[in-house]
């Protein structure tokens, strides 16, 4: 199908029972099923019914915590999770159109391993894979690996010279990581596999390339052991809250998730990312900037607020987030998305406060409202995630260099 991609893009961020820490205690939640394939398959199938571009799946290398930088001692919130890449590989074949984007922590994993994991996901999804790259400054996560030590880091340290040095180092490493992964995806040319039974030739060795990547923290020789993925380059995405991560989005990503709280902030963030893109020599490339919002959605305006208050009471404190928290009706949310879209955001990643309640509210109430307004697709226009996002399949850098 060649119809143009939807003017407004939607992703859904999946995390356990939902983004509110007391979500698992709601009657509609399924806390006993959070570690089953069926639970995740149901969520992604629901998202696909709503024609959503893709889902992201949260992950980390340490237990969930109410603190952004260290473990907590709480036992009244969801703790424990499955590996996001493996969830993605399990659920992708059960869907047909929606993109599947697991989270990967670049700080303690290896680019070679992740490149073949995401390439494999692209094969099992027939071209609908992406990855969300994330860094970790947590000492407890570093201790699981024992390969490096990180200095103590709290949110209030972010603005200090030592904090900025650590953050810059982690994001520079992430940019190197993405570059190595992208080169590995290109290390097999598209026609490297001949598979000619008559001549006994399976591959053309001249079409496999060493990448010889040298970074400050790792070097990767290549080539990959997995042939070039169906999309050529699966989608790379990252969450960004400030200049250093904005730079990573501009240098290395196809999609950035940002957290503006109003249209003016959205405009400023988009301008900063575009300036960084130009500085990185990517001014003419499409980099989507999606706004993140946590959503409590109900048809009755008072019901969403009451539900949020009830969940806050169960949690013992008001829920806060890095992203704007929207509490209201699907019509009000559609108004807000259009307003933020006019500020330059090309899409949104919605975080359902309670997965069992707010995800169906997105797919069955918000999406029809956006369709009525003519700003969201009525059918999937492409068979790949790149296609849904209006991104062409890129040429192979090594084939182009050889030619």
Image (spheres, helix red, strand yellow):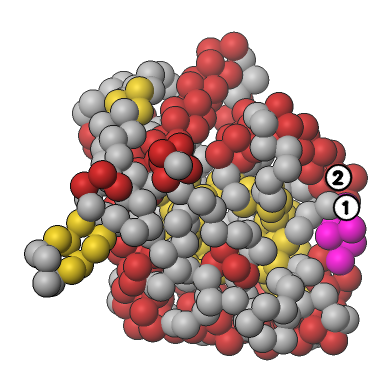
- Is the residue marked by circle 1 packed among few (<14), some (14-19), or many (20+) residues within 10 Å? some
Observer-nearest residue: 319 or 373? 373
Left or right of 370, for residue 163: left
Location of mark 1 (residue) = 343
Residue 239 marker: none
Quadrant where the N terminus lies?
A: bottom right
Q: To which quarter of the image does residue 9 belong?
A: bottom right
- The quarter holding residue 388 reads bottom right
For the point 57% across and 30% down, which residue is it? Answer: 155
> Is residue 241 left or right of 233 when viewed as pictured?
right
Q: Position of residue 386 (x, y in %)?
A: 57, 63
**In the rendered image, the vertical position of residue 40 relative to residue 71, given as above or below:** below
- Looking at the image, tell me whether mark 2 or mark 1 is earlier in sequence order: 2
From this viewpoint, is residue 104 visible?
yes
**Between 82 and 17, the one nearer to me in the picture:** 82
Q: Residue at 18% across / 68% down in the picture?
A: 196
Residue 387 location in percent, x, y?
Answer: 60, 68
Give me the residue at 60% from left, 59% from top: 392
Q: Which is the main secondary structure of the residues drawn in magenta?
A: helix
Secondary structure, mark 2, is: helix
Label 2 Cα neighbours within 10 Å, binned few <14 / some 14-19 / many ≥20: some
In percent of the image, x 59 and y 76: which residue is there? Answer: 382
Labels 2 and 1 touching (C-beta < 8 A): yes
> What residue span does the magenta drawing correspond to?
338-343
Q: Which numbered circle lies on residue 267?
A: 2
Residue 135 lies in magenta, yes or no? no
Q: Is residue 340 magenta?
A: yes
Q: How many marks?
A: 2
Q: Determine if residue 115 is in view.
A: no
The front one of 302 and 333 is 333
- Tell me where residue 150 appears, x and y as whole percent: 37, 22
Q: CA distance from mark 2 to mark 1?
A: 5 Å
């Amino acid at each position: 199908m060649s119809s143009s991609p939807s003017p407004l893009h939607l992703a859904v961020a999946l995390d356990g029972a939902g983004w509110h820490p007391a979500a698992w205690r709601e009657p509609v939640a399924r806390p006993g099923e959070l570690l089953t394939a069926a639970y995740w398959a149901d969520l992604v199938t629901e998202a696909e019914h709503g024609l959503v571009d893709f889902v992201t799946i949260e992950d980390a290398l340490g237990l969930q915590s109410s603190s952004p930088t260290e473990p907590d001692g709480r036992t009244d919130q969801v703790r424990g999770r499955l590996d996001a890449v493996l969830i993605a590989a399990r659920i992708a074949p059960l869907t047909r159109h929606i993109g599947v984007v697991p989270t990967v922590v670049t700080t303690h994993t290896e680019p070679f391993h992740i490149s073949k994991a995401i390439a494999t996901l692209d094969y099992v999804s027939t071209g609908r894979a992406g990855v969300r790259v994330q860094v970790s400054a947590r000492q407890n996560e570093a201790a699981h690996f024992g390969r490096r030590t990180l200095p103590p880091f709290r949110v209030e340290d972010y603005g200090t010279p030592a904090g900025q040095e650590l953050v810059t180092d982690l994001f520079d490493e992430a940019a190197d990581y993405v570059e190595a992964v992208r080169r590995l995806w290109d290390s097999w040319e598209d026609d490297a596999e001949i598979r000619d039974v008559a001549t006994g030739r399976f591959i053309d060795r001249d079409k496999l390339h060493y990448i010889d990547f040298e970074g400050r923290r790792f070097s990767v020789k290549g080539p990959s052991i997995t042939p070039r993925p169906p999309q050529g380059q699966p989608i790379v995405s990252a969450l960004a809250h400030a200049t250093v991560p904005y730079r990573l989005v501009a240098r290395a990503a196809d999609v950035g998730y940002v957290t503006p709280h109003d249209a003016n902030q959205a405009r400023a963030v988009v301008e900063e990312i575009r300036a960084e893109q130009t500085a990185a020599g990517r001014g003419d490339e499409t980099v989507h900037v999606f706004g993140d919002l946590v959503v409590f959605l109900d048809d009755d305006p008072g019901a969403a607020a009451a539900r949020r208050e009830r969940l806050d009471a169960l949690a013992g404190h008001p829920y806060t987030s890095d992203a704007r928290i929207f509490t209201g009706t699907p019509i009000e949310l559609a108004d807000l998305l259009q307003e933020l879209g006019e500020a330059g955001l090309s899409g949104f990643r919605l975080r359902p406060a309670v997965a069992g309640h707010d995800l169906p509210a997105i797919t069955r109430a918000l999406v029809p409202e956006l369709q009525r307004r003519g700003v969201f697709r009525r059918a999937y226009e492409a068979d790949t995630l790149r296609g849904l996002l209006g991104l062409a399949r890129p040429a192979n850098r090594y084939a182009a260099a050889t030619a």
